[in-house]
Image: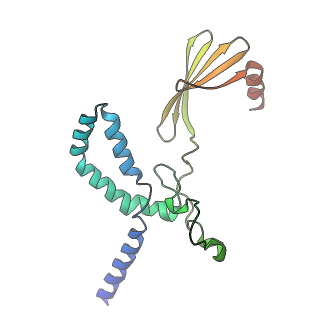
Amino acid sequence: MKSTIIKIAIVATLTSAMTGCIGSNAVTAKVMEFNLKAVDNRYARGGLNFLLIPVYGLSVAADTIVFNSIEFWAGKNVINGKPHIFDTKMNTMLNINDDLDPSLTDAPLDPLTQVNSTQKEVYSASITPINDSTLDFHLVYTNGDKATLRGEKNGEMVNFYYDGEFVTTVSILELQQHAVNS
């Protein structure tokens, strides 16, 4: 009886862990991002990569066993908010979704996070006046990313730049109307 319970537990564990073999590997991607951002020299990055071998091993294990499994069952990765790779729409050789119950075509659990890769929520913002016609809005997002939105007044228009890249031009009247409607 005891051995049967152990076998069932092992099969259940392996079955759920095998769903984590494929996923976005977000923990490993974060380690790789750190490796690339730590230094700008390719040889130093190579040396750091060598030193990070144990960390990469742990990150791959964490992705495979924990985060990719959660991603599979929830449909989204809890770290980067990306949908599971198995939910990617493609031209397939065998189409079976039309023949299945709709409950079998999506992830069975509700997503564990509301942040997705195309949408960020602002956690905090601060404003720094640069001069009489320029304001910097320092943004911090819920995922930890930071950005600067700059507004430069030019006559009756305001030019907006996001991290130095031009985004749009808006009239002061449009901004006032938006403020009233918000």
Q: Residue at x 73, y 24 (%)?
A: 175
- Which x, y percent locates residue 125? 55, 29
Instruction: Quadrant for residue 106, please give it.
Output: bottom right
- Residue drawn at x 57%, y 40% as measured from the top left: 121
Say which of 71 and 4 sits in front. 71
Nearer to us in this view, 111 or 29: 29
Number of labels in the image equals 0
Residue at the farthest top position:
132
Residue found at x 61% / y 74%: 96
Residue 111 in the image: state x and y as whole percent: 55, 58
Q: Position of residue 77 (x, y in %)?
A: 48, 55
Q: Is residue 141 above or below residue 104?
A: above
Q: How is the image coloured?
A: rainbow
Residue that extends furthest to the front in the rendered view of this protein? 93
Left or right side of 154 for 34 = left
Along the line of sight, which residue is nearer the eye, 176 or 95? Answer: 95
Quadrant that contains the C terminus: top right
The relative height of residue 90 versus residue 114 in the rendered view (above or below) is below
From this view, report whether residue 176 is shown above or below residue 58. Answer: above
Q: Residue furthest toward the bottom?
A: 1
- Please tell me which residue lies in front, 124 or 163: 163
Q: Quadrant of residue 22?
A: bottom left
43 sits left or right of 63 in the view: left
**31 to the left or right of 182:** left
- Relative image position of residue 87 (x, y in whole percent): 55, 61
Where, quadrant-wise, is the N terminus in this rendering?
bottom left
